[in-house]
Amino acid sequence: QKEVEQNSGPLSVPEGAIASLNCTYSDRGSQSFFWYRQYSGKSPELIMFIYSNGDKEDGRFTAQLNKASQYVSLLIRDSQPSDSATYLCAVNILSNTGNQFYFGTGTSLTVIP
Amino acid sequence: DGGITQSPKYLFRKEGQNVTLSCEQNLNHDAMYWYRQDPGQGLRLIYYSQIVNDFQKGDIAEGYSVSREKKESFPLTVTSAQKNPTAFYLCASTPSDDGGSPLHFGNGTRLTVT
């Protein structure tokens, strides 16, 4: 079983603050790492992806990957009420039967105006 | 516009009936996936397919069946053998490459079985 662990939250931050979301994974064969945002009743939408150790920035979002610690995080700067959603961490493992994606249970984020 | 179309958006069935959920993509992706999501839960993999006429079981395949007769289509049948079929079902696709491409999702089908 490939495990992807996230704090379920809920995580509450005031508007304008930094929200920090964390994820750990069990399989060292994990190759690619993704963060999805999911609004209630909707399908997940891709926020960020990262493949290499270090930081990757895209606008207000920064993904951080540490493969030695099997840890990936997402920072949201200048949080807005529209960022209130559930954030899903996903990892990709390439096997002899193809690409498989495994998801955490998600962290619920509320940004308070 | 390229994308993944799932239909219907909502589906209601009586217990004991089989039901088929449709998933069509025009992204020219090789790989397609079906996930199930229960309230407050993450996504659990039901089946996936890397190429036409081939598919693999995921972690929770019991009570489900799929077919992949065309690259664009990957329908999921929820059979009467599935003990708790009420859930949100998500279809996704990705280019079948070295694992670097993300999943693209359809809008989902919410199935309620009573």
Image (cartoon, rainbow, N blue to C red):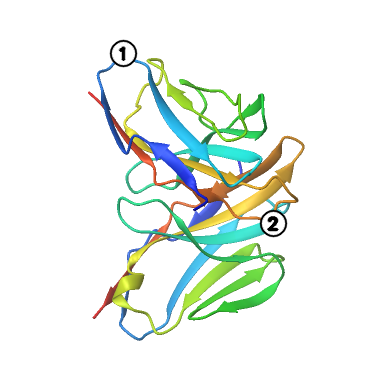
Say which residue appears at 34% left-offset and 35% top-offset.
Answer: B87
Taking depth in this image into account, of B7 and A89 the one nearest to the observer is: B7
Above or below, B106 relative to A77: above
- According to the image, label 1 marks what residue? B16
* Vertical placement of residue A52 versus A41, above or below: below
Chain letter of disc 2?
B
Q: Are marks 2 and 1 on the same chain?
A: yes
Q: What separation in Å lies between label 2 and label 1 (alpha carbons)?
A: 40 Å
The kind of residue on which mark 1 rests is Gly
Quarter of the image holding residue B8?
A: top left
Residue A94 in the image, given as x and y percentages of width and height: 72, 46
Give the percent coordinates (x, y) of residue A74. 52, 71
* Res B16 seen here: yes
Query: Label 2: few (<14), some or many (≥20) within 10 Å?
Result: many
Q: Position of residue A16 (x, y in %)?
A: 35, 86
Left or right: B77 in relation to A98: left
Q: Residue at x 55, y 43 (%)?
A: B26
Q: Amino acid at mark 2?
A: Gly
Q: Chain of mark 1?
A: B
Disc 2 target residue: B100
Query: In the rendered structure, are the residues bearing label 2 and label 1 in contact, judged by CB atoms less than 8 Å apart?
Result: no
Seen at 48% across and 39% down, the residue is B35
| Residue B51 disc label | none
SS type, badge 2: loop
